[in-house]
Amino acid sequence: MVLDISRVAGFTDYFVIATAKSPRQFEALAHVVEREVPAETGAAKPRREGKSDSGWQLFDYGDVVVHLLTPEQRHYYGLEQLWSGGTPLLRIE
């Protein structure tokens, strides 16, 4: 999911919220977000918070913050509901 939160948050413009359903998928997505996205887009390497075994990793690019979660963590934290004042731009299921 891509969520425009620019009107409700002063620290970033967009959240990208993604779910990884297995440890292998989690690591693969984390690799792409941290290494391949900057290489392809020219963006700076993101600040990274969390570890894959915690079920939630955050990659901060400044204007875009990527949340990578397990299904359990995504349900527990409910970021879409927490930031419901934002505008959903893309949802892929």
Image: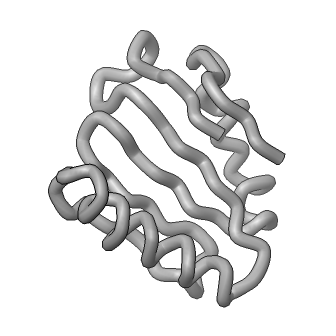
Give the residue at x 55% y 71%: 29
Total count of labels: 0
Quadrant of the image for the N terminus?
top right
As drawn, the residue found furthest toward the right would be 93
Quarter of the figure with residue 14: top left
Q: Position of residue 90 (x, y in %)?
A: 66, 30
Residue in the picture at 68% in, 35% down: 80
Residue shown at 47%/22% (left/top)?
5
Q: Percent x, y for residue 88? A: 65, 23
90 lies above or below 40:
above
Q: Nearer the viewer, residue 90 or 17?
A: 90
Q: Is residue 21 above or below residue 6?
A: below
| Pick the front one: 34 or 13 | 34
Q: Residue 69: percent from the left, percent from the top?
A: 64, 64
How was the colour assigned to the protein in this rendering?
A: one colour
Q: Is residue 45 left or right of residue 70?
A: left
Image coords of residue 49 (percent x, y): 36, 68
Which residue reaches farthest front?
40
Q: Answer above or below: position of 78 versus 50.
A: above
Residue at the spot 76% in from the left edge and 42% down from the top edge: 92
Quadrant of residue 64 within the rendered picture: top left
